[in-house]
Amino acid sequence: MFEILKDSPLFNGLDNHEVDSLINNALHQIRQFSGKEVLAFSGEKVEKAMILLEGKLQGEMVDFAGNSLKIEEIEPPQMVAAAFLYGPQSVFPVNLSVLADGKMLVISKKDFTKMLSADPRVLNNYLNIVSGKAQFLSRKITFLSFKTIREKIAYYLLQNLKKSSNIILMNQSQKGLAELLGVARPSLARTISEMESENLILWERNQVTIVELKSLQAILGK
Amino acid sequence: MFEILKDSPLFNGLDNHEVDSLINNALHQIRQFSGKEVLAFSGEKVEKAMILLEGKLQGEMVDFAGNSLKIEEIEPPQMVAAAFLYGPQSVFPVNLSVLADGKMLVISKKDFTKMLSADPRVLNNYLNIVSGKAQFLSRKITFLSFKTIREKIAYYLLQNLKKSSNIILMNQSQKGLAELLGVARPSLARTISEMESENLILWERNQVTIVELKSLQAILGK
DNA sequence: CCCAAGGTGTAACAATTGTGACACTCTTGT
DNA sequence: ACAAGAGTGTCACAATTGTTACACCTTGGG
């Protein structure tokens, strides 16, 4: 039915036929989205299981001053709000907004639950997804816990640094990175300047070169 | 076997006999702990399922400057590190340290997995626990995302305020609260003073009285 | 090819928080 | 009842970050 579904972590280990069969036994629909729509607001109840088929979504916290903190980007064929379908307080923790037009598969919670019972592999996959989410959030907390922008930058770079290379490709604008780190954009730029003039890093449009790895590690290790 | 286990969220809906039977079919042991021991360090692999039977534990992040940020307190009969047993990166996200002497039930991951398969109720309970954890972490992020101490305090108070009362009982020292909010203790005290002199709240040792609820909400709502 | 829109570098200034220090108060065990 | 330890109120000062503003790049349509 949807080719991409068999690559979804949820259906890991199942073949096309099995996936189709599961989907067809459940109440489902396709939801299209486009523009700058907000698909769900923080606090709204999560009542359906959602799997992104096309496009790109973003989860962001919006504080009361209107500032936003990007929590994560969601790309196909990931599940949306997977960790918030069950549990004591199943509401969206973030605003869910559209980054790129697309569509998603929506399944009623009831039928999704049946689907989990019907196939132990799917259940196991789902368990891994939810655990993974918790781990992701935990890492996010690590991030927010760093007090200084310098630490956040160092952590981000070291986290994205591939072994046997000293170059990090940036798929993110400074503006986007500032949101991710939860700091003001000019403040980020300032700290980057400082680190450049100290010869720790070389920050170019699309890539960052680590000049002094040890000093960078020292920022986190002192 | 252990009376308290039947009250554990994991065994919700099962009777004593069923719980005993599940436990006895799994490799398990009792681990005692005391003093100021650190039971597990952040980054250590989670290889066993753990259920707290007695005492009190604390999960805390320790940054590189030695400051700690308390993430949560764990009391019986909760599971320990429930959301970190499965998933792609099953390591402790925090240091697990002892707040009060006690003991916990330790079950090998393999046998715990069997236990989940053996009883759909336990599996469902576990799913709820893990989802709940993700939701907890998500709320924690909400906290850390507030920029000012004033906002954090307002959020904390409103979150802990019971309906039809304007008094909040504090089971937490200012020091503990400062750690929870991730701010320095004197900074917290300063902001509390300010809010008191503005007649928003009345902060006493063991309880906080909300004087002007609307103004408190306005801090978060502007 | 040029314009418009978004991204980036930078600066001065304001606001907030952290630090370290000290006196004082409360609690608890002996 | 008292001493010791932990928690609290407060201060001056340092450090960091946010704000606002503006000039300058880049890039991708028209």
Image: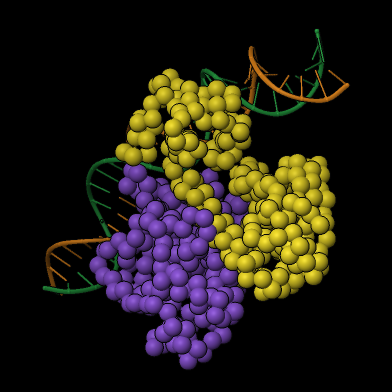
Chain colours: A purple, B yellow, C orange, D green
Q: Residue at x 35, y 30 (%)?
A: B215
Q: Residue at x 30, y 61 (%)?
A: A38
Q: Between A6 and B211, which is closer to the camera in this rendering? A: B211
Measuring from the top left, give residue A97's x and y in whole percent. Answer: 33, 62
Give the vertical position of A35 relative to B214 (above or below): below
Extreme bottom residue here?
A17
| C30 relative to B217 in the view: left or right | right
Image location of residue B116, percent across then percent down: 67, 70
Compared with residue B18, is residue A54 higher up or lower down, i.e. above or below?
below
Image quarter where the N terminus of chain B lies is bottom right
Nearest the viewer among B39 and A91 is A91
Residue D11: x %, y % from top left: 51, 18
Residue B51 can be seen in this image: no
Q: Quadrant of residue A65?
A: top left
Q: How many labels sit on residues? A: 0
Above or below B100: residue B141: below
Q: Residue at x 74, y 59 (%)?
A: B16
Kindly identify the residue that appears in the image at 56 percent across and 81 percent down: A119
- Which quarter shows the C terminus of chain B? top left
Residue B124 visible in the shown view: yes
Q: Nearer the viewer, residue A148 or B133?
A: B133
Q: At which x and y percent is residue A33?
A: 28, 71
Q: Quadrant of residue B109?
A: bottom right
Left or right of A183 in this view: B101: right
